Image: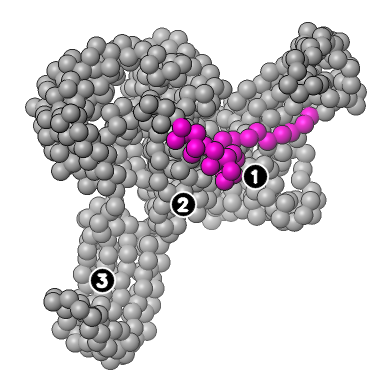
Amino acid sequence: MTLTQTHRTIEAIWRMESAKLIGSLTRMLRDVGVAEDLAQDALVIALEKWQEIGIPDNPGAWLMTTVKRRAIDLMRRKKLRDQKHVEIAREMDLNHEEDIDQTLDGEIGDDLLRLVFMTCHPVLSQDAKVALTLRLLCGLTTAEIARSFLVAESTIAQRVVRAKRTLRVEKVPFEVPPKGRQRKERLSAVLEVIYLMFNEGYSATSGDQYIRPLLCQEALRLGRVLSEITPHESEVHGLVALMEIQSSRLKTRVSATGEPVLLMDQNRAKWDRLLIRRGLAALKRSQTLGSTLGPYALQAAISACHAEAPTAADTNWIRIAALYEALSRATPSPIIELNRAVAISMAFGPAYGLQIVDELSAEPSLKGYHLLPSVRGDLLFKLGRCEEARKEFERAASMTRNDREKELLLNRINECEYRGTN
Amino acid sequence: MRFLLIVKATEFTEAGIRYGRKYTDAVNAYKKTLARAGVLLAAEELHSSSSGIRILYPSHGGDPEITAGPFLVSQELIAGYTLIDVNSEDEATKWALQMPFPKGFGAFEIEMRKLKEETESVQDPITRAMEAELEDQTNI
Amino acid sequence: MKFMMIVKATTDSEAGVIPPQELIDAMQKYNEELVKAGVLLAADGLQPTSSGIRISYPEPGEKPKVTDGPFTESKELIAGYTLIEVRSREEAVEWALRMPDPHGYGQGEIELRQVYDVEDFIDNPETLEKEVTLRKQVAEQKKA
């Protein structure tokens, strides 16, 4: 092996282990910032040592032992300096070398769970949660995170520093919240961060295509890890199912020339069957856990309807409309209602969809929202009311500032005029 | 959200007179504090306007007029800036008020401005997904 | 990126001998590790080639030749596979190294192969061109 090859191998191993290292260290030291520093030190030590002695048989355990020794040293010094820190010392039996293999399984899962609850804690801003989660749980470098979000590296670096500081100042505990409503809310915050990461990669139709899938992959990986640690949480499986199924279409939703391809026009033969199968299995797990389906499982179920249809014409719109109805009840929002209107128009005809859209027109939160006239225009067009449709598309075009959207709407306006005069 | 803390030029900076060791130390300490708090994105000092030029495009069109510095201090010149990323306007104001200023060099002015953000990156992901789905379904 | 860890067949696997409990346990533990790390996509074991067939095309354009198993040359045969999704080639190698010796007695062999992604094809300008022509054709057919 060449020197750079060894270097890359060590980095890959460290990245596989880093979240576990940081988790265990945070439990010992109660400071995620110091924990991350020590985990980074372990990489430096490994790079030095392993190039000399070769990569050990069990590199994960080697890294864990190394960082734990360092943590114990640190605590001893701290204890000497400040006798008041008995509490920290109590956390760790100093005379007892832990049997790494024994603690690996259950505890590491718990540590990862505590860690993700910490990086997604409500005291942090959404941006901070995403950056810190990618850094500490996915082991991405600040440069990689910055590239994924198309922002300056210093922005991410400082965001991470600030987030760790906030956690310290606010004395956020390293724990899994107690069962009940609080746990449910905190878990949904974690899922939101993961889905945010996924969406950021998934919705990117511009920019560097090779970098953004990184976010999808990391989100999916973290979701899969989480579903393993929390096997009884329906929504975790729901989110994993949603991400698996959406990922199955990742490569068909952009054409070879970089243009977005609508779901109905995608080449279904190219959808990744393995991911669909995994998604359906996760959805089934989520459905059999006894609770009513949450928003992620419902979205996954909608996504599954598309995945299971051999052709666009085979789509079970009646079921999709029913699922949107359930989603609308789980998280009431006018945008979901708009989606329901579209599904209903596909299932029962545009006149039924239009009825719902017209009811929504009075909704104050949709005032100035370009998708309302866009959908209305689309339904009117399908009903052959081209003149009215054109007016709606024009109204929508005047509301959006996005160039791509404007262009699409302009196309629809031309279509209306063409159809209207012929 | 990001804020730009602009340090205005004075007759002293324009004449190339340093504010002295004490001020420099205070500025360095301030920058360190910002970095440790995780809010510092950039901090730069500018040369006096004598090394600058101005490009003026006349209203009637035609070639731009280029004028070499130095320019007048009364024309709102900039001597330096610090770019910070904070959670609220209050926090930005707090940092701006902590910015060091030189004593014994007359009036000193700092201007705080909020940066336009390209997109609000914080959006509920479900809403975002729903919007994408809607656009997908209706070709808009 | 996806990798396939292919476990080669052995005389025992071809004979349908059930592996010792120890190995089954070790493999199960290993698969659990893969799941916990969020990298496992699929893992399956194959029945011996005695239940398989081979379809070969000795003459291009002619009818295929179908041969019933079992097949010999066990080194070339496959007994199972594990599909993983990882961040780097190095990570795939590390996981492959962590897999327990699938057989023992000096016969265990794992082969690691990277799986093509659609991007790998799209990267190629020739395929890209083909894709574009194909899309155009489809679009024209739609119009017609």
Left or right position of B33 against A369: right
Spot occupied by residue C139 in the image (x, y as percentages of width and height) = 41, 31
Spot occupied by residue C101 in the image (x, y as percentages of width and height) = 81, 27
Q: Residue lying farthest left?
A: A362
Q: What residue type is labelled 1?
A: Ala
**Disc 3 sits on a residue from what chain?**
B
Q: Is mark 3 on a helix, strand or loop?
A: strand
Inter-mark Cα distance, 3 to 2: 28 Å
Q: Which amino acid does label 2 sit on?
A: Arg
Image vertical order of residue A400 relative to residue B128, above or below: below
Q: What span is colored magenta in the figure?
A: C110-137
Callout 3 environment at 10 Å: few (<14), some (14 to 19), or many (20+)? many
Image vertical order of residue A123 relative to residue A179, above or below: below
- List the residue tagged with mark 1: A12
Residue A151 falls inside the magenta stretch: no
Type of secondary structure dominating the magenta stretch: helix
Residue A164 in view, yes or no: no
Left or right position of A104 against A328: right
Q: Which residue is drawn at 39% across and 19% down?
A: A312
Q: Residue at x 72, y 38 (%)?
A: C93
- List the residue tagged with mark 2: A147
Inter-mark Cα distance, 1 to 2: 19 Å
Q: Earlier in the sequence, mark 1 or mark 2?
A: 1
Image vertical order of residue B88 relative to residue A397, above or below: below
Q: Nearer the viewer, residue C100 or B101?
A: C100
Inter-mark Cα distance, 1 to 3: 43 Å
Residue A386 in view, yes or no: yes
- List the residue tagged with mark 3: B6
Q: Which amino acid does label 3 sit on?
A: Ile
